[in-house]
Image (spheres, rainbow, N blue to C red):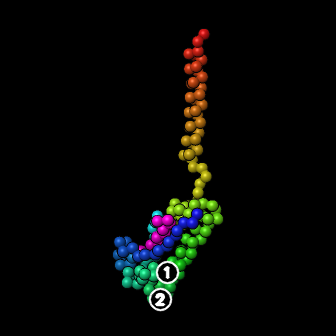
C-alpha cells in the first residue's frame, strides 16, 4: 500500500522541433517502475533548469509553464490518493490509467464472447459424453 512515488519533469532534447524547442516530459516513478508522458509544452533548451525541473526566468510564459507543471504534479499526487481511497494498488499501470483518464472496464466484449464459447463447448462435450456412454453401454 505504501508505494514510493517520485515525479520529475525534464526537457527531452531528442524531441527537438524545427524551431529549436524541446518537449517537456513528466516522469512518474512508482516503486522503481516508470511512466514517461509528454506534457505537450515546449521550451528553449537554455531556459530549462535541470536541477529544479522547471523553467528559468520570470517572463509570463515561464510562469505559466511552471504553474502548469506544478498543477500536473499536484494531480499525480491526487491520483495516488484516489487509488488509496479506492483500495486499488498504487502501481504503474493504475497510475498510467488515472493520468490518461482510462477507466477500468468491468466486462470487455471479447471476454463475454469467450465466456459464452467456453460454456457452449462444455455443454457440447457433456452431451457428446452422454451419447458416447449410451452407445458403449453393455446390453
Estimate the x, y position of residue 39 in percent, counting from the top left: 48, 72
Q: Which residue is mark 2?
A: 59
From this viewpoint, which residue is outermost toward the front? 2
Which one is nearer the viewer's eye here, 38 or 34?
A: 34
The quarter of the rendered structure image containing the C terminus is top right
Q: Where's the N terminus, which quadrant?
A: bottom right
The residue depicted at 54 percent of the width and 46 percent of the height is 110
Residue 73 on the magenta span = no
- Near mark 2 (Cα within 10 A), the count class, few <14, some 14-19 or many ≥20, is few
Q: Quadrant of residue 12?
A: bottom left
Q: Earlier in the sequence, mark 1 or mark 2?
A: 2
How far from the left and from the top, in percent, is residue 40? 47, 73
For the point 55% across and 61% down, which residue is it? 94
Question: Which residue occupies 57% across, 29% down?
Answer: 124
Q: In this view of the protein, which residue sits in the foreground, 125 or 59? A: 125
- Examine the rendered structure and indicate whether residue 92 appears above or below residue 112: below
Tell me how many marks there are.
Answer: 2
Q: Does the image show residue 98?
A: no
Local SS, label 1: helix
Pinpoint residue 115: horizontal percent, then vertical percent.
58, 41
Identify the residue at horizontal 41%, vertical 80% (top origin): 50
Q: Position of residue 9 (x, y in %)?
A: 46, 75
Please, what secondary structure does the residue beneath circle 2 have?
Answer: loop
User: Where are the magenta residues, as a range?
Assistant: 23-32
Q: Which residue is mark 1?
A: 65
Q: Can see residue 139?
A: yes
Q: Main secondary structure of the magenta part?
A: strand
Q: Is residue 121 above or below residue 11?
A: above
Q: Categorize mark 1 by other alpha carbons within 10 Å: few (<14), some (14-19), many (20+).
A: some
10 or 7, which is in the foreground? 7
Amino acid at each position: 500500500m505504501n508505494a514510493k512515488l517520485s515525479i520529475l519533469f525534464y526537457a527531452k532534447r531528442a524531441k527537438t522541433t524545427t524551431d529549436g524547442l524541446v518537449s517537456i516530459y513528466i516522469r512518474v516513478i512508482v516503486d522503481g517502475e516508470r511512466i514517461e508522458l509528454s506534457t505537450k509544452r515546449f521550451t528553449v533548451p537554455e531556459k530549462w533548469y535541470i536541477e529544479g525541473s522547471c523553467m528559468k526566468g520570470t517572463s509570463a510564459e515561464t510562469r505559466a509553464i511552471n504553474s502548469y507543471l506544478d498543477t500536473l504534479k499536484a494531480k499525480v499526487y491526487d491520483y495516488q490518493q484516489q487509488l488509496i481511497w479506492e483500495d486499488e494498488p498504487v502501481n504503474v499501470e493504475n497510475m498510467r490509467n488515472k493520468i490518461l483518464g482510462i477507466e477500468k472496464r468491468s466486462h470487455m466484449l471479447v471476454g463475454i464472447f469467450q465466456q459464452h464459447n467456453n460454456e457452449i463447448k462444455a455443454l457440447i462435450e457433456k452431451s457428446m459424453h452422454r451419447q458416447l456412454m449410451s452407445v458403449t453401454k453393455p446390453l
